Each structure stands twice: as C-alpha cells, then as structure tokens.
Image: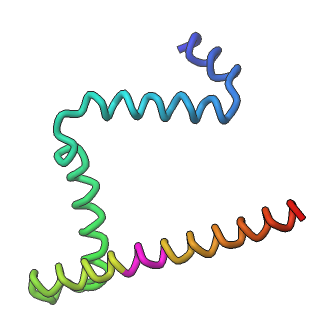
Amino acid sequence: MENHDKHERGLTPVQRSMRARAAAHVSWSRTTDRAARTEPARRAALDRFERQVDPEGILDEATRRKQAEAAKCAYFQRLAYRSSRARGRHHRTQQDIAD
C-alpha cells in the first residue's frame, strides 16, 4: 500500500482522473456480458422510480411500471434541459471572453 500512496501523492487531479478512466476502460474491455454487469444498477434505478410513483405499493405491477418509466423519462428530460442551459451559459461566457 505504501507504494500506491507514493504514486498518489505525485499525481495531479487530472492525472488521477486519466488513470481512473483508463482502468475503467480496461475493466469494460474484460467484461463479456455488459447487460449482466449493469443489471443490478438498472434494477435499483427502476425500483427507485417505482417507489417514487407508488410509495405505498398499492398500484398493480403494470401500472406502477408504466408510471415509473414515465417518471424516469421525465427525470432524464429535466437533466437534458439543465445540461442544455448550462452549455448555453458556458457558450455565452466563452463569447464574452473572446470579445
């Protein structure tokens, strides 16, 4: 562990990020069943949306699933909207700097 710590101290945040990204790519290159690897996360996300739309658990499964999918779509649409707004602000800031 000491050797690992020594390497950590000499890295900038950008270098640590680059190293982590490379490790993630290696990990994914060794994954033969990507769907199986990500299934627990997808299931947990859908479970969260199902609890959001039916906290008491009173809806039938089909209705709860349909509403959860709609809630998930709305969530990602809001994320896309906020990302678009942020990119617009960044673009305007860059234009101000260039002027």
What is the chief secondary structure element of the magenta stretch? helix
Between residues 9 and 89, which one lies in front from this camera angle? 89
**In the depicted structure, whether residue 33 falls above or below residue 61:** above
Segment tinted magenta in the rendering = 74-79
Residue 55 shown in magenta: no
Q: Residue furthest front?
A: 99
Q: Quadrant of residue 95?
A: bottom right
**Residue at 42 percent of width and 77 percent of height:** 77
Q: Position of residue 59 (x, y in %)?
A: 14, 89
Quadrant of the rendered image containing residue 18: top right
State whether residue 11 is above or below residue 98.
above
Residue shown at the point (37%, 27%) measured from the top left: 26
The magenta stretch spans residue 78: yes
Task: Determine the image quadrant of residue 52.
Answer: bottom left
- Image quadrant holding the C terminus, namely bottom right
Q: Residue furthest right?
A: 99
Taking the spot 18% from the left edge, 34% from the top edge, the residue there is 32
Locate residue 79, reporting x and y percent. Answer: 49, 72
**Who's the residue at 28% across and 55% down the image?**
41
Is residue 81 rendered to the left or right of residue 34? Answer: right
Residue 49: x and y, percent? 30, 75
- Residue 93 is situated, as x and y percent measured from the top left of the image, at 79, 67
